[in-house]
Amino acid sequence: MNKESLETIENEVSVFVRRIVISEKRNAKLERSAYILLRQLSTHGPAGVKILADQLQLDISTVSRQAAALEHKQYVDKVPNPRDGRAYFYRITDLGNRELDEAKQRRYDRLSNLLKDWSEEERESFGQLLRKYNQTVDSDN
Amino acid sequence: MNKESLETIENEVSVFVRRIVISEKRNAKLERSAYILLRQLSTHGPAGVKILADQLQLDISTVSRQAAALEHKQYVDKVPNPRDGRAYFYRITDLGNRELDEAKQRRYDRLSNLLKDWSEEERESFGQLLRKYNQTVDSDN
DNA sequence: TTAAATAGTTGTATGATACAATTATTTATT
DNA sequence: AATAAATAATTGTATCATACAACTATTTAA
């Protein structure tokens, strides 16, 4: 295995992560964590904190707080699970969906502007490799 | 521009970042921030917090604390700048270099294991695209 | 029917970061 | 030369994202 590729990945990843984290903090109308949680609820439907924590690979206490914050902003409803008195479903609201769509759009616009001089192949390839990396990590657990 | 690529990048980046941050926290003998700062001192030579903050694109207060933490662990020396009584140089120590090398090795090993089933082209391409992304962000500022 | 397991919340802690205020020193202006 | 302005660094305070541990309420298993 060529060590140079690994070194490049390793070196660039740390910079990459920091840049993303910082740039997202600036944009932050909807924080990264809220965005990801909303997206999860939007694409996979209502769920309780246990399920969400599993899906997002976070601690349930973390998700509990994030969900409470979304509820406070009225981006989600917290509905009791009729079949389990301990449990709830968090369900994205219309307002939440609108905010999510807008956040998505802002993100796409920014990315689209940033990567405007890349070739179509590069953009395509970058997306695929990020996806592949994430899948590799997941299957590694 | 193909919107699908952008969507993929956008969706995968947030997961990617979170995975990295979490996995680095687990490994953490040397935290990510400390690692990056040490690496900077190692590759670009001694510098004060102002310079480091510029290079790393962080607030000087952030770097000041990180540098103080490294000094406390004796991974760096803090030497007064002879030409400016306000300023200091942080200089990596032998111990710091050893720790950095070990941390690097651990990271390469982990990455090497994780990406063992990728093709050489994929690894190469992933590193190049991450680098290109970082450069694109930098030149965008 | 009691014991064990589970869903969720809340208290506490840590790491990474920024902004604002402060200190000490240097550079520029009068 | 004396004073004002700029600068390097530190420290106080705050926020966000996260985890672990303790706890409550409820459900499931023995």
Image (cartoon, coloured by chain):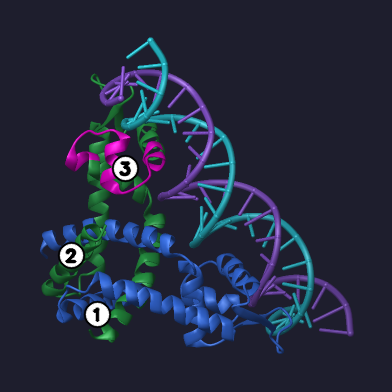
Chain colours: A green, B blue, C cyan, D purple
Magenta segment boundaries in residue numbering: A41-64
Residue A55 lies in the magenta-colored region: yes
Residue B86 image-quadrant placement: bottom right
Question: Which residue position holds label 3?
Answer: A53
The spot of residue B28 in percent (x, y) is 46, 65
Which residue is at the front of the view, C4 or B76? C4
Give the vertical position of D28 relative to B80 (above or below).
Answer: above
Please tell me how crowded label 1 is: few (under 14), some (14-19), or many (20+) other residues with Cα within 10 Å: some
Compute the Cα span from label 3 to label 1: 33 Å
Question: Which residue position holds label 2?
Answer: A132
Question: Which residue position holds label 1?
Answer: B128
Residue C1 image-quadrant placement: top left
Horizontal side of residue A57 vs B67, given as left or right: left
Q: Which quadrant would the N terminus of chain A be assigned to in this image?
A: bottom left
Q: Are marks 1 and 2 on the same chain?
A: no
The spot of residue A117 in percent (x, y) is 20, 75
Residue A12 lies in the magenta-colored region: no
The spot of residue A48 in percent (x, y) is 28, 33
Q: Are marks 3 and 1 on the same chain?
A: no
Residue at x 55%, y 80% (from the top left corner): B96
